[in-house]
Amino acid sequence: MNKIDIKCAVCASQTEEAKDLVITSTVQGREIVITGLTGTRCPE
């Protein structure tokens, strides 16, 4: 996989500890699983 620069959505600082996030949300009664780093925040 290609190296992707990941930046925090809050402080816009680059973070390397971010991991792929699996988000499950229900839209119009359908279960959607999103894998990615969209809106990643710094680990607290």
Image (spheres, rainbow, N blue to C red):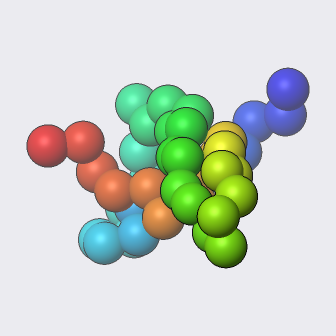
Residue sitting nearer the eye, 32 or 17: 32
| Residue 10 in view (yes/no) | yes
In the picture, residue 22 is in which quadrant? top right
Q: Quadrant of the N terminus?
A: top right
- Whole-percent x, y for residue 7 in the image: 49, 59
| In the image, farthest residue toward the right | 1
Relative height, residue 43 to residue 28 (above, below)? above
- Whole-percent x, y for residue 30 in the image: 70, 58
In the picture, residue 43 is in which quadrant? top left
Residue occupying image coordinates x 84% and y 34% = 2
Residue sitting nearer the eye, 20 or 30: 30
Count of numbered circles in the view:
0
- Whole-percent x, y for residue 9 in the image: 41, 69
| Apparent side of residue 13 relative to residue 29 in the rendered image (left or right) | left
Residue occupying image coordinates x 29% and y 71% = 11
Residue sitting nearer the eye, 17 or 40: 40
- Whole-percent x, y for residue 36 in the image: 65, 46
Q: Quadrant of the C terminus?
A: top left
| Residue 16 in view (yes/no) | no
| Apparent side of residue 38 relative to residue 1 in the rendered image (left or right) | left
Relative height, residue 29 to residue 40 (above, below)? below
Residue occupying image coordinates x 44% and y 37% = 18
Residue sitting nearer the eye, 33 or 35: 33
| In the image, farthest residue toward the top | 1
Residue occupying image coordinates x 29% and y 51% = 42
| Apparent side of residue 20 relative to residue 17 in the rendered image (left or right) | right
